[in-house]
Amino acid sequence: MTVTISSYSATGIAPERFRQVFRRYPAGVVAVTADAGSGPVGFTATSLTSLSIDPPLASFGIAEAASSWPHIERAATAVINFLGADQEPLARRFATSGIDRFAAPTAWRRLPTGEPVLDEVAGWLRLSVEQTVPAGDHRIVVARVEDSWLDPERRPLVFHDGAYHSL
């Protein structure tokens, strides 16, 4: 089945078409966590990208309207938590506005360097923020990968067509 929507906005394709196209693109699910000094914050993202091997750089996007943005903007470091296939409830929790995402039942701890990291994830990257780049209604955070941990036995959580899946 082919679906064609030919509506356009003044600045490109219509927002509905943009969402429709990207819903069909599978993406890994991560929870970005940080603490800029006023307690841990975090949010669910599918916008993680590896940018460079030398130096090791990664990026993620965050909406300027997101409640976590003011904290991420001030944070010098962040953690990318790769969610496992069984962690859909955690992904939904970190995607919910207006709640304390770190309250029970969320299990988490601090790394020796102070950043909040979620328990039982498939892996994590500890990042040092290098720059933020304005991009429409979002910011792109570019960061250097400083440390990592990986559980090679855990399958990843994937988001596709509006739903969570495992491989």
Image: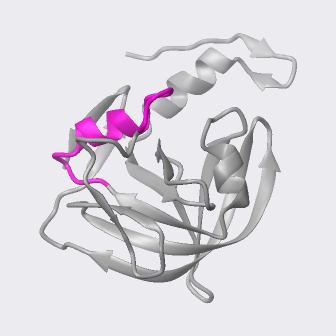
Give the side of residue 129 with respect to residue 103, left or right.
right
Q: Does residue 167 sit above or below 63 in this rendering?
A: below
Q: Does residue 123 sit above or below 39 in this rendering?
A: below
Judging depth in this view, the residue of 12 and 28 nearest the camera is: 28
Q: Residue furthest bottom?
A: 54
Residue 61 screen position, x and y as percent = 62, 49
Give the side of residue 153 with respect to residue 75, left or right.
left
Residue 141 screen position, x and y as percent = 67, 59
Q: How many marks?
A: 0
Q: Residue furthest left?
A: 153
Residue 68 screen position, x and y as percent = 60, 43
The colour scheme used here is: one colour
The magenta segment: 83-100
Occupied quadrant, residue 105: top left
Residue 46 screen position, x and y as percent = 47, 46
Q: Residue at x 40, y 52 (%)?
A: 30
Q: Is residue 95 rendered magenta in the image? A: yes
Q: Residue at x 56, y 14 (%)?
A: 4
Magenta portion: prevailing SS class: loop
Q: Is residue 79 rendered magenta in the image? A: no
Judging depth in this view, the residue of 63 and 48 nearest the camera is: 63
Of the 4 image quadrants, the one containing the N terminus is top left
Q: Residue at x 48, y 80 (%)?
A: 113
Q: Residue at x 35, y 35 (%)?
A: 93
